[in-house]
Image (cartoon, rainbow, N blue to C red):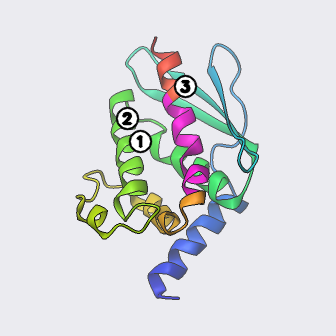
Amino acid sequence: MSGLEELYKEIIIDHYRSPRNKGELPPPATRTEGFNPLCGDEIVIYIDVDSNGVLSDIKIGGQGCSISQSSASMMSAAVKGKTVAEAQEIIGGFKAMMSVHGDALGDPASEATAEPEVDLGDLEALKGVVKFPVRIKCATLSWNTLTQAIDEATA
C-alpha cells in the first residue's frame, strides 16, 4: 500500500471512529433520511439554513458501513458554514469524483473525464471507492440525502 493510500485509509477510519457533527438538531431544522436497501446503510441529516442561505449547522446520524459513515462525517465537515451554492458545488465535485475514475465495467474511455474542479480536501480519501462499484452507493448515500435536505430546506 502506498503512503497516500495509507493516509487515505487513516482518514476514513478516523471519520468512522470519531464522526464529526454527530447528533440531532431540534425543529425547525430540516430532517431528512436516506437508506440504501442493498446493504442496509442508513443516514439521517439535520440542517439549518439561515436567512443568508448558509448551512449554519448540520448534524448526522444513522448506521452503516465504514464508507457510508465516514463519507457522511467528511461531508458534514466540508459543507458546514458554506452557502447553499457552495455546498451544491462541493456535492457536484464529490459526485464527479465518484464517477470520474472509470465505470463499473472498467471502461478506460471514462478515464478521460476531467477531474472535479472543486478542492475536495480530505474527501479525496474516498476516491478509491470507485474501484469497488457496489460501494459507490455507500459513499454517495449521505450526499444524495444532503441534496434532498437542501431542496426541502430551500423550497
Looking at the rendering, which quadrant does residue 25 occupy? Answer: top right
Secondary structure under tag 3 reads: helix
Q: Residue 69: x and y, percent?
A: 66, 52
Work out how far the residue at label 1 is from the one at label 3, CA to CA, in angstroms.
12 Å
Proximity of marks 1 and 3: CB atoms separated by less than 8 Å = no
Proximity of marks 2 and 1: CB atoms separated by less than 8 Å = yes
55 or 33: nearer the viewer: 33
Residue position for label 2: 88
Instruction: Name which residue lies at 64% across and 52% down.
Output: 68
Which span is picked out in magenta? 135-147
Label 3 neighbourhood size at 10 Å, few (<14), some (14-19), many (20+)? many
Q: Residue 83: x and y, percent?
A: 37, 30
Instruction: Name which residue lies at 60% across and 58% down.
Output: 134
91 or 51: nearer the viewer: 91
Q: Is 139 within the magenta?
A: yes
Q: Which amino acid does label 1 sit on?
A: Ile
Secondary structure under tag 2 reads: helix
First-in-chain label (3 vs 2):
2
Secondary structure under tag 1 reads: helix
